[in-house]
Image (cartoon, helix red, strand yellow):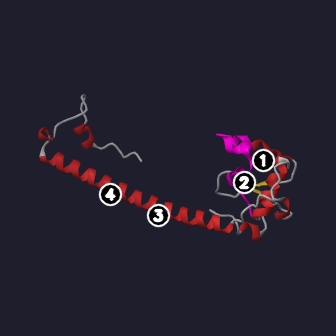
Amino acid sequence: MERERKKSDELIAKEDGLLLLESMDKVAIIKKYLDLEADLKNARNEIEILRRLLIKSSEQYKFLQATNPHIDQSDYDKSWSWVNKIVFVLKKINRPLRSSEIIEFITPYEPVLQRSHYRAQAFSANLNKAVKYDRVKAYKLSGSRGYYYVLPAWLDINGQLAKQYADKIFFK
């Protein structure tokens, strides 16, 4: 977070970058001190907000891990098409998922994704194919970036997500 440039900054800034405190008058030093103290207080408040956000995200991640079933190796078949693999994950997890979540579940079973540095790009064509063939629907949740991917059976006639599945979306 960049702070506003203040008059006291101009007193400190000089062509060579430094102005010694001895050459500053008492009022300028006090003003600079108070400005720095206010900046420090703002930084501490921001750190506290980010710390709370990290704790909340960590708790939500642990909840997400605990509520997601483990995909057993015997249930998963590497010879399936990518579209079938995506549908399998959605059925197994039984809740709307973002593309990153689908990738997270498939990666341990797919060497292609494990070796890829750009998993999302490698996977997006397959996800788009699943949407194109209407095996999966891209569901836009207002106020969020990107899409959640859902099975067509989870949507009502108006294209709205059924309440039982909408309640399963994390990080609303």
Q: Main secondary structure of the magenta part?
A: helix
**Residue 114 is covered by the magenta coloring:** yes
Mark nearer the N terminus (1 vs 2): 2
The residue wearing badge 2 is 102
Q: Which residues are magenta?
A: 95-123
Name the N-terminal-most of marks 1 and 3. 3
Between discs 4 and 3, the one toward the N terminus? 4
- What residue would you read off at disc 4? 41
Q: Which of marks 4 and 2 precedes in the sequence? A: 4
Q: Is residue 135 left or right of residue 41?
A: right
Do tag 1 and tag 2 residues touch (Cβ < 8 Å)? yes
Residues at circles 4 and 3 in contact by the CB criterion of under 8 Å: no
Image quadrant assignment for residue 169: bottom right
> What separation in Å lies between label 2 and label 4 (alpha carbons)?
41 Å
Kind of residue indicated by mark 4: Lys
According to the picture, the residue beneath numbered tag 1 turns out to be: 127
Look at mark 3 in the image and give the residue it sits on. Answer: 52
Mark nearest the camera among 1 and 4 is 1
Q: Residues within 10 Å of mark 4 (few under 14, many from 20)?
A: few
Residue at (81%, 52%) from the top-left corner? Answer: 85
> In terms of secondary structure, where does tag 3 sit?
helix
Return the disc, 1 or 4, that comes first in the chain's sequence: 4
Q: Position of residue 7 (x, y in %)?
A: 26, 42
Question: 121 left or right of 13?
Answer: right
Vertical arrangement, residue 37 with respect to residue 6, above or below: below
**Vertical order, 4 against 44 (above or below):** above
Q: Position of residue 110 (x, y in %)?
A: 74, 47
Question: Neighbour class for label 2 at 10 Å: few (<14), some, many (≥20)?
Answer: many
